[in-house]
Image (spheres, rainbow, N blue to C red):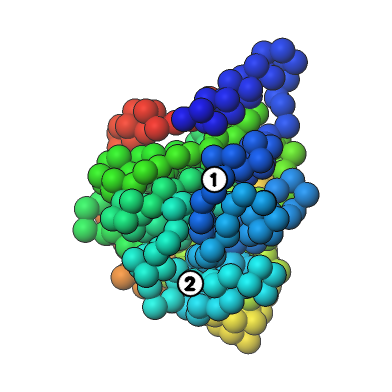
Amino acid sequence: MKLSTVGLVAGLLATLLTGCVPEVKTGLDVLAADQYSVLEGKRVGVVTNATGVDRRLVALPELLARAPKVTLAAIFGPEHGIRGEVSAGHGVDHSLDELTGVPVYSLYGKVRRPTREMLGGLEALLFDIQDIGVRAYTYISTLKEVLAAAGETGTEVWVLDRPVPINGSVVEGPMLEDGFQSFVGSHRIPLRHGLTVGEFARMVNEELELGASLHVVPMQGYQRGSFQEASGLQWVKPSPNIPTVDTALVYAGMVLIEGTNLSEGRGTPRPFHWTGAPWIDATRLAAELNALDLPGGIFVPVRFTPSVSKYQGETCFGVDVRITDRKAYRSVTVAVALIQTVKRLYPGEFEFRAATFDRLACTRELRESIEGDTPFEEIVSSWDHDLEIYLQRRRKFLLYE
């Protein structure tokens, strides 16, 4: 595609000529700089939320509504809604966008795949949502459903690419096993997968033979091993409980806490950083975890009272997971070590919520290994072979070094 080639070449030339990493332009910025020429004369729909903004934080629907040769006809919203304000797991209704006056169709309510009626009259769909690089985060599942629907109707899909905020070089965790597909595990990738949304779209469209007419508008100046701040882009929280980049990095492993009777910190100032329960000795747990000398993070005793979710209104004791070195920090390793330590210290109180845990891990083997007291180091190393195969498999879909 002409636009993709221009974007890639421009980014490479800037790096070669200046000798430094250029400021990242998202797929949206690249498309806007080209004055949306590839969409000229088309009726389009957008799949987006509060993260789908340009460098000035102007939202994609507003930008398209101003574009003189493009007709914005529909907006589609993922989990948490188009403003990113709805709590996790809560359904979202259809509505009318106050700013543009176009219909808003929820893809996290009665349906999770656009219907033929919703796509009727649309010639193109633009997907612009900031993902965080974690399989259990539902935005890539929405993308998969969009591609599947578009493959059936012949609607073009344009994915406006964005960075992996927790970096795209590190991959971690168990692979999705057959039979464990769900909306928090839509394709055979590891828990921390290291793909941009554009790369994921390329992978899933080909490997699942979805048949979508897919176009990815790549970023300019992006480097795979960088974290969000290196992009020069402002952070817009992609959902209510991911307020910072560090939270996204911690979430990549601590999402597994949702499958236990520990609080994952929802309803506190530090979701996923804080974890605990009323029956834990915070000082002892922090000491036990720090003694493991896990790279890139430390554990600080904490006392908290969740305002929602598990142990709502009850005083909990546990740890605050603090990142000291993002590059060294391994999200899934920390989570597995933490769960295993709590189970060892509190065998009579700790419980798995097996169905939820297995659905998030996309395998029952991880839970069974923890239950069987397999050392966390052995559990983590057991993923190495599958991750190496995955890295080879994903290579053909990568757009950035």
Q: Please tell me in which quadrant of the rendered image residue 104 appears.
A: bottom right
Examine the rendered structure and indicate whether residue 318 appears above or below residue 201. below
- Visible in this render: residue 299? no
Q: Residue at x 55, y 35 (%)?
A: 218
Answer yes or no: is residue 231 visible: yes
Indicate the position of residue 187 as horizontal and vertical percent values.
32, 50
Badge number at residue 381: none
Assess disc 1: are there few (<14), some (14-19) or many (≥20) residues with their C-alpha within 10 Å of its C-alpha.
some
- Helix, strand or loop at label 2? It is strand
Q: Residues within 10 Å of mark 2 (few under 14, many from 20)?
A: many
User: In screen coordinates, is 232 left or right of 148?
Assistant: right
Quadrant in which residue 107 is drawn: bottom left
Mark 1–mark 2 contact, CB under 8 Å?
A: no
Residue at 63 percent across and 22 percent down: it is 10
The type of residue carrying mark 1 is Leu
Residue 37 lies left or right of residue 158; in this view the side is: right
The residue at which mark 2 appears reads as 106
Q: Nearer the viewer, residue 219 or 362?
A: 219
Q: Nearer the viewer, residue 8 or 393?
A: 8
Residue 114, percent from left and from top: 39, 65
Q: Position of residue 357 (x, y in %)?
A: 37, 65
CA gap between label 1 and label 2 equals 23 Å
Q: Which amino acid type corresponds to the residue marked 2 in the rendered image?
A: Ser
Q: Residue furthest right?
A: 56
User: Residue 179: where, in percent of width, then height?
Assistant: 21, 58
Residue farthest to the bottom, as pictured? 313
**Mark sitting on residue 39:** 1
